[in-house]
Amino acid sequence: SVDGGELARVLSETMYAASADENRYGLNGLHVEVNDGTLRAVATDGSRLAWSETDEGEWAQCPVSPRSLLSLRAAKMLARLAADEVGVWAVTRCSRATAWTSPGGAVLITQLVDGEFPDYRQVIPDKWRTAAVVRVADLAAALKRADVIAKESRSHTLVLRVAPDQIRVSTSAVDGGSMAETLHTETDGPDIEIGVNARYMLDALAAAGDQVTLAMSDALDPIVVQYGGRTNLCAVVMPLRID
């Protein structure tokens, strides 16, 4: 069993990172696993990754153990239903499908995707050299302004430059002009300049509260997004080469 509100949260906080390409078996869905009584959902499209987890449930005889792969379409439907009917949901599983029963008795049967999800733990860095704590509202606003110009390129590329007590957001386009904006931050570590996809970073910020920590090591290493002291949510955004 699992709390419906927690189930909806876990799915909603990760679905954005799943691949929208139905031909990418294994990435066009959510990886769901249970370890030590904790339910975790993970999604990635190869350019970003998000995981969220909850321990609000009973998993001693876990029907989704050790792992299941839900299609993106099924995950969206399940998240919507769980958000509408908060309470204890029952989960049962056979070899190829999982049944999710709401507190009111409605049953959603989701066929599991026949695909191999990558070892996502290898993508998430456990060490970094530079970390910057920034207000989400300020960073999101700057990213949206930068993306007005950055969207002229398919990659939506912009540059984050982390220096003592500041992050500089900048971008330029051949026909769209350029912009630069400096935000106040709390930083730790050496200066770093890294290219990112504006839309991917904005998606990662959507689940954040008042502030996030951006942790990074090098211009070509992943950016880890940590959410204001939360230990049950994390995102990774892969960098882009700066021309």
Image (tube, helix red, strand yellow):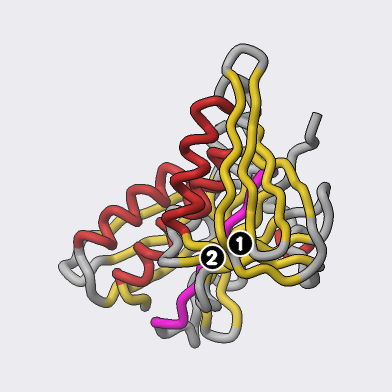
Q: Secondary structure at mark 2?
A: strand
| Residue 11 lies in quadrant | bottom left
At x 51% / y 52%, what residue is drawn? 139
| Residue 242 lies in quadrant | top right
Residue 9 spot, x, y in % from top left: 38, 64
Q: Residues within 10 Å of mark 2 (few under 14, many from 20)?
A: many
Q: Which residues are magenta?
A: 47-56
Name the residue that disc number 1 marks: 225
Q: Secondary structure at mark 1?
A: strand
Name the residue that disc number 2 marks: 212
**Quadrant containing the N terminus in the rendered view:** bottom left
Residue type pointed to by label 2: Val
Reply yes or no: does residue 50 show up in magenta: yes
Q: As displayed, is residue 109 above or below residue 152? A: below
Are the residues flagged by discs 1 and 2 in contact, CB closer than 8 Å?
yes
Does 85 sit left or right of 231 as displayed?
Answer: left
Residue type pointed to by label 1: Val
Residue 209 spot, x, y in % from top left: 41, 66
At x 80% / y 36%, what residue is drawn? 241
Reply yes or no: does residue 5 show up in magenta: no
Residue 23 vs residue 170, the one in the foreground? 170
Q: As displayed, is residue 188 above or below residue 166? A: below
Q: CA distance from mark 1 to mark 2?
A: 7 Å
Residue 3 spot, x, y in % from top left: 32, 76
